[in-house]
Image (cartoon, rainbow, N blue to C red):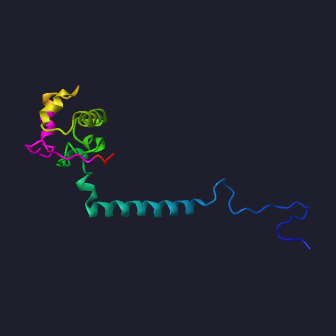
Amino acid sequence: MKSNDEQGDGDVRETRPSDGPFLMRPTDQLTLFCVLLMGAVAISVYTVYLGLGTTGLVAIEQAPRRTFEFQIDINNATWTEIALLPNIGETYARAIVEFRESNGPIEDLETLVQIDGISEKKLYQLRRFTIPLPEDAALVVDKNRP
């Protein structure tokens, strides 16, 4: 008994869903294209409806600059705390702590000018970030802090 795919001379014909290199027929491709195009148009319309097309992106440069104000006790602060002050950094912070440990508690911020690299300008910038020092020299320094 011969199948429908066989011809009388013994050759077997292969049946494929399409004769071209594509997996879909041209009408199926056109249908898929139309569906995808309608989806893209719908997303675009929805985006404009939400207002995203008119407002644009938020520019980071236009955001207001925030400044943080804090004060430290120069006689009890560690070098890591002093390094948080503007224009100080690790090198000057370590120098301040070393100066404090070798000369005792800092009675007046003007004495910090004795440290190499700390100028009057830098000292002026530091004033607003340091807790006012008491007028008497009886300051207690916590030796247990690292």
Give the x, y percent position of residue 45: 32, 62
Closer to the camera, 28 or 120?
Answer: 120
Residue closest to the eye, 28 or 2: 28
Q: Is residue 93 left or right of 113 when viewed as pictured? A: right
Which of the 4 image quarters holds residue 127?
Answer: top left
The quadrant the C terminus occupies is: top left
Query: Quick check: 62 above or below 95?
Result: below
Q: Main secondary structure of the magenta part?
A: loop
View extreme (bottom): residue: 1
Q: Which quadrant of the structure image shows residue 38?
A: bottom left
How many numbered circles are shown?
0
In x, y percent, where is residue 29? 55, 60
Q: Is residue 88 left or right of residue 39?
A: left
- From the top left corner, tell me how far across and down residue 16 is, in percent: 73, 62
Q: Nearer the viewer, residue 56 or 24?
A: 56
Residue shown at 67%/54% (left/top)?
20
The quadrant of the rendering that contains the N terminus is bottom right
39 within the magenta span: no
> Residue 136: x percent and y percent?
9, 43
The image shows residue 137, relative to residue 36, as above or below, that is: above
Name the outermost residue toward the front: 138
Start-end of magenta stretch? 123-142
At 49% from the left and 59% from the top, the residue drawn is 33
